[in-house]
Amino acid sequence: MIRVHRIIASVFGIGYLGRGAGTWAAIACCMVFYWVPAGNAVYSWRAFIAVVLLLAGGWSAGQVEPLWGKDSNKVVIDEVAGMLVTLLFIPLHLRYVLAGLVLFRFFDIVKPLFIRQLEELPKGWGVMADDLLAGIYSNLVLSVIIACKLF
């Protein structure tokens, strides 16, 4: 069972890339988001997938923590889930996806506005929660940029 958690937490091995693995995982999410058609129920499916990733990621990150340590760089499911939250309800346009990627990585790396405090949650939930909030902030900023036609 731990093998499944390693696969989920590392997003099929992306976490093993070492330095920058979180960015590569976020880029992979953007590519899938942009190029895989979601059909007519695009927003509901993406929201459902985001919830599933957040729950599975929290569970798996908690399971691999004894092996890899707290908030290991190998755990990148949080970046994928956070990136997906960033892009929820955003029109499918390449420039918005790229802007979302930049915003998400900014919030995820700098960790302003209470994001860092969420890392203190127990097990894998702290790993997931900080990226969830970074994704929410990124989504809000991107939504304002789109609504104001700034980009």
Image (tube, rainbow, N blue to C red):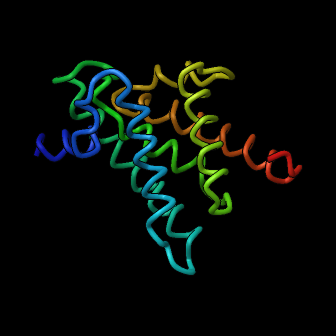
Asked whether 33 or 130 is in front, the reply is 33
**Residue for point 39% across, 51% down:** 53
In the image, is residue 10 above or below residue 29? above
**Residue for point 60% across, 35% down:** 102
| Residue 60 appears left or right of 39 | left
Asked whether 106 or 5 is in front, the reply is 106
Displayed quadrant of residue 92: bottom right
Name the residue at the right extreme.
148
**Residue for point 59% across, 25% down:** 115
Name the spot of residue 107 as percent of width and height, x first.
61, 28
Asked whether 27 or 56 is in front, the reply is 27
| Residue 148 appears left or right of 50 | right
In the image, is residue 94 above or below residue 23? below
**Residue for point 89% across, 49% down:** 148
Name the spot of residue 99 as percent of width and height, x first.
65, 42
Displayed quadrant of residue 43: bottom right
Displayed quadrant of residue 22: top left
